[in-house]
Image (spheres, rainbow, N blue to C red):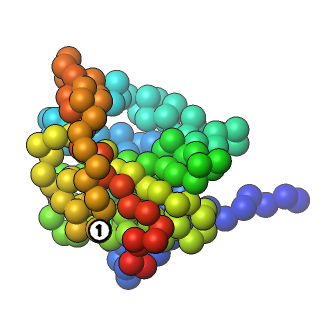
Amino acid sequence: MKTAAPLLQLPVATDLYLRRATTADAPALYYLIDRDRPYLRKWLPFIDFSQEVGDTEAYLKYVSAPGNTSDLVFVIVHGQKVCGLIGFKSMDKLNKKLEIGYWLAEDKQGKGIMQRACHTLLGYAFEKLRMNRVEIRVGVGNERSSNIPKKLGFALEGVQRHGEFLNGHFHDLEVYSLLRSEFKG
């Protein structure tokens, strides 16, 4: 009898870890999206496209499909409860670069959870995946989110004009990067 491989899990702190997302996480993630919809909508373009659990499940199915080599997505688990999502997108193995994207439930903000989760993913990107460059893109004006790459030593490279279509309008994105040689593990 063939058994399933264990899910990739990355420890962050005693009460905090990242676990590879699966479609089984769809109900918990959708609950957070729906509960925090007004808060999340301000900065995340996918919120209005997540209208039912099936939408979240379809996304998770896509990013966890065996043929998808550009995404690696984790749920953030704090106190044994899923509280957000973080992961790699636009992985470019040839040029050894990727982007980190993330979101966190409103009631978990301001506790250092996302900064610690990003630091853990940086270690994984540079040490295990052998990446050379990691980017984080943040909506101009999203100070909570832009504080994360700043505190982690990322350099602000500039602003991508009209980089994201959000709430019926184009918005500019700050582009931050960190190189392997700059990472303080």
Assign a secondary structure to mark 1: loop
Residue at the spot 36% in from the left edge and 40% down from the top edge: 30
Relative to 58, does residue 170 appear above or below in the rendering?
above
Farthest residue to the bottom: give it. Answer: 14
Front residue (pair 138, 64): 138
On screen, residue 101 above or below 119:
above
Q: In the visual, does 38 lie left or right of 72?
A: left
Q: Residue furthest right?
A: 1
| Amino acid on which the number 1 mark rests in the picture | Leu
Q: Return the x and y of residue 102 as percentages of the image width and height.
A: 34, 50
Q: What residue is drawn where x is 65% and y is 47%?
A: 94
Q: Position of residue 86 (x, y in %)?
A: 40, 53
The picture places residue 38, in percent across and down from the top left corner, at 14, 35
Decide if residue 96 is in sight here: yes
* Residue 83 screen position, x and y as percent: 32, 56
In this rendering, would 108 be left or right of 18?
A: left
Quarter of the image that includes the N terminus: bottom right
Quadrant showing the C terminus: bottom left
Q: Please indicate whether residue 93 sits to the left or right of residue 37 in the image.
A: right
Q: Residues within 10 Å of mark 1 (few under 14, many from 20)?
A: some
Image point 18% across, 60% down: which residue?
Answer: 147
Is residue 22 visible in this depiction of the protein? no
Q: Could you tell me how many numbered marks the image carries?
A: 1
Q: Which residue is mark 1?
A: 152
Point 44% across, 29% down: residue: 55
